[in-house]
Image (tube, helix red, strand yellow):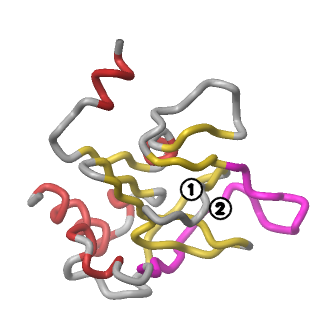
């Protein structure tokens, strides 16, 4: 089916926002399995902690050790601001290229094989987002 077709793709794939979350194994949001490309669970932000949910607005992109060398981040300064709108977040994993902090650290940019994901909206993130999208196109 569709799941097998997507998971067998060989060309670069970029999931944005919910598209990034779909790359993971599962979500707290429901019992439906996700694509399972990246082994981790996506969880909701804890509104009880005093955070405003959804996390909406500009926040800093922090490359993980070695993440600054990832092709998607070429020409992007560490700490650059990108635009987020989300209520669920993936934990930082070995596949995290860049993280962000909003009460907890979470994956902002991830990559495993030819699958990449951005929790933020590059199309709404000005010149930084345009650079990331151009880097993806250039892969």
Splitting the image into 4 quarters, where does residue 124 fall?
A: bottom left
Is 21 situated left or right of 52 in this image? left
Q: Which residues are magenta?
A: 43-63
What residue is pinned by disc 2?
A: 55
In the image, taking residue 6 as reference, residue 31 lies left or right, namely right
Quarter of the view holding residue 78: bottom left
Q: Is residue 9 above or below residue 113?
A: above
Q: Residue at left 28%, top 22%?
A: 5
Residue lying at 40% horizontally and 49% vertically, measured from the top left: 16
Q: Quadrant of the C terminus?
A: bottom left
Label located before the other in sequence (1 or 2): 2
Locate residue 69, reporting x and y percent: 25, 79
Instruction: Please determine whether, in this image, residue 24 is positioned above or below residue 94.
Output: above
Give residue 112's position: percent from left, percent from top. 34, 54
Q: Work out whether 134 lies above or below 74.
A: above
User: Is there a contact, CB below 8 Å, between mark 1 and mark 2?
Assistant: yes
The residue that disc 1 covers is: 85
């Amino acid at each position: 089916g569709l799941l097998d077709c997507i998971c067998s793709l060989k060309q670069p794939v970029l999931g944005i926002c919910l598209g990034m979350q779909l790359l993971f194994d599962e979500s707290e949001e429901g019992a439906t399995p996700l694509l399972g490309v990246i082994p981790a669970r996506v969880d909701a932000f804890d509104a009880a902690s005093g955070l405003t949910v959804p996390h909406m607005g500009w926040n800093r992109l922090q490359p993980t050790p070695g993440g600054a060398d990832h092709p998607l981040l070429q020409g992007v300064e560490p700490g650059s601001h990108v635009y987020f709108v989300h209520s669920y977040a993936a934990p930082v994993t070995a596949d995290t290229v860049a993280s962000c902090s909003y009460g907890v650290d979470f994956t902002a940019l991830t990559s495993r094989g030819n699958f990449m994901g951005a929790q933020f909206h590059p199309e709404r993130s000005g010149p930084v987002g345009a650079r990331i999208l151009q880097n993806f196109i250039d892969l």
